[in-house]
Amino acid sequence: MAKLEDRLDHLLGNAAAELLLKDFELRTVGDVLRHYPRQYVTMGQLMSPEDLEPGIHVTIVARVLSAKLLPMRRNPKLKMLKLRLNDGRNEYDVTFFNGHKISYHIKEGMRGMFSGVLGKFHGHLQLTHPGYLMMPDAVAGGDAQLLRTGDKIRGGGAIADMARGLVTDDGLAVSDLAQPMLPMYRASKDTESWAIMRCVRQVLDLLDEIEDPLPEPVRAQHQLISLDRALRTMHFPRTKEEAALALERLRFDEAAALQLLLAQRRLEGTKAGAPPCPRVAGGIRAAFEERLPFELTAGQLAVGATLEEELARPHPMNRLLQGEVGSGKTIVAILAMLQVIDSGHQTAVLAPTEVLAAQHARSIREMLFELATAGELGAPEMATRVTLLTGSLTAAQKKVALAEIASGEAGIVVGTHALFQRGVEFADLGLVVIDEQHRFGVDQRDLMRSKAKGGVSPHVLVMTATPIPRTIAMTVFGDLEVSTLRELPRGRSPIKTSVVPAQQRPGWVDRAWERIVEEVGDGRQAYVVCPRIGDEKSDPPPTPPVMALDLPEPDSPDKKGPDEQEMVAAVELFDKLIAGGLSSIRVGLLHGRQPPNEKNTVMQEFGAGMIDALVCTTVVEVGVDVPNATVMVIMDAERFGISQLHQLRGRIGRGGHQGLCIFVTNRNPGGKAWERLTAVAATNDGFALANLDLEHRHEGDVVGAAQSGRRSGLLLSLLKDEQVIADAKEFATAIIARDPSLREHPGLAEMARSVAATTSTEYLHKA
């Protein structure tokens, strides 16, 4: 007998086990049983001749009365095989279109099984290109043995594949092939579906009853069948209802395994030591709050109170702050940083690009004003210093920055990946703020944690402007507590968005340039975003970087022609606009291949109002804050993902003036790309768009196995299984609270270990 942890070579032999390992990384009995069918084939039931009706899927056992190879009318070189069958009661006409191949297997007088959808033509029952399996002459029908291992199988289609998979040393009977649902597996060049089915059947025949890891009260609460029944039924269900019950149980197990792992990590985080940073009366935070020229929203106050409380604890805060574009996350983060500085510790802000890092440093200095002038003449006593560290600094600039960080003079350190370098030493790091978490991996987050002194871990605040569906928050970010900002600051007007079909309405594109000129005439500014740079012959299409999940949906096959033209390039459009539609205003150019100093200069000039319109790539997607910008034109908008369009659009209308965003596309109205763009244009609700994005793209495996290069048998759907994930999280949190190491639940411990051991978990934390 066999158990889930047994090796496959002991049960199946070396040859079969080696193929399963090479093609699918299946090593144990449990692995092969969790290589689930991708679909089921209904072969049709062996029905009495009098019960046959057109339109049903049937399997019949009949003798071949005649077999004629005839030329096809449209192409006489091709042959079709015409059969007349008799099952003892009825006769059938059967047609095969690849007759020259099949005629070698099917001869007059032979008996066989034929499976397909029954039709009727001129009063005659018929089957068109059915699956078939020819019987040895000795078989008389009924439940007699059709085949034994080693017999040559003469047949085609699913029924022949099933025969290959079901035949054993004990033989194969007619009734074996009349099962209502037969599994089809993800196969490979060397290992076909029927071979996998044979392995699964052999393993199930030897498998001991599986001890269920889920406590019986939990199964009863969620109306789940046993694991033993679920695994057996998943491969060979008798009805769709049975398959659904098995699927429900196995989905819960997958969600529970992941949530157990995340619950353990959350608990471990509370045990680590961190510098307690309670609120200090009369400190820099209080001074900053007194200087704020506006009132915080109710959401900002609520999230701020949560952070204030968690920073005061002696163990690390690990919190994700998500919020709409322009919802005020930066102010909340600054308040948290100042609270840590009041307690005598440093803070670090990690940004994914130099443009964004420079923007953060500039914005923080402007908001703190004299509170960011520590070391300067006349600086307030509680003032601190904001230091920027990026890879493009000169050697002299870098030396100064490193000295300010090491001495503790820099209370707020803003940087890119340069902060990970060995030479970067903090005097006393108390808080790490990670902006746009999806751009960084868990290893980089750990590197920042290692910068703290004395064996303690700094508090961590992760921020994202990409609204996250609840299912993703419970899985991809399941080791973080989540706070959400939904409301926009007072006075912020919703952005109006229009979709312009460039091919059908070229005049509307010209009108977009006129609108920019009009806005500039009223003292405003504008962005023109392009999908590629264009300073070389071929640029790759943009890959939306949102959570490594926001990929543009492949468009439907809209009418070809104009839709297939080359993407608009920033460099080329810049040259065209300064000589044409925007020749009357000051136009700047910004893209990722410019030297860092040039990029920073362009952004500073745009922020200072010295540039009226900025032609750019997605380098401005996140963090760029120019309140005076009110118009954005996005060229080839269909090339961007839903969340990325929302991110880009969020760069305008930040100063209280009405924002206008124009999506220019060459796609035809009515296609999928057009539908996606109009859906984004119809709402400014990023949370609704996040769910829409999840519906439009391939979500992949829940923990990213598909993206990490290894396809697993995961059944969970981020889109459909929110309640399953929520139930599993509640169960896992309760279990870990009572039994943190799962010593009392060895089956659950093994479930969590199985998730921790997969490459998909690595992706989970790098997502």
Image (cartoon, helix red, strand yellow):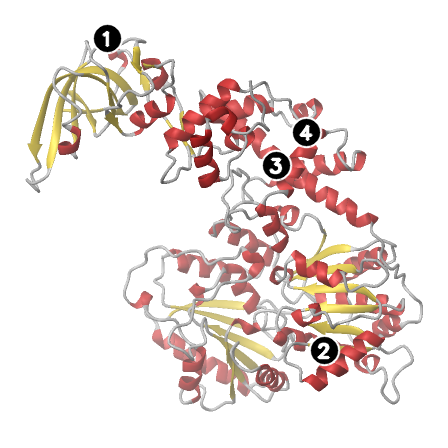
**Marks 2 and 1, how far apart at CA:** 86 Å
Q: CA distance from mark 1 to mark 4?
A: 50 Å
Q: Amino acid at mark 4?
A: Gly
**Residue 122 on image: x %, y %:** 12, 24
**Distance CA(mark 1)–CA(mark 3):** 50 Å
Contact? badges 1 and 3 (CB < 8 Å): no
Q: CA distance from mark 2 to mark 4?
A: 50 Å
Label whose residue precedes the other's in the sequence (3 or 2): 2
**What secondary structure is found at the residue carrying circle 4?**
helix
Q: Which residue is mark 1?
A: 140
Density class for disc 2 (Cα within 10 Å; few <14, some 14-19, many ≥20) is: many
Q: Quadrant of residue 453?
A: bottom right
Q: Residue at x 50, y 31 (%)?
A: 32
Q: Secondary structure at mark 2?
A: strand
Which residue is pictured at 37% across the width and 25% down the height?
A: 165
User: Please, is residue 650 above or below residue 72 in the view?
Assistant: below
Q: Are marks 3 and 4 in contact (CB under 8 Å)?
A: no
Secondary structure of the residue carrying tag 1 is: loop
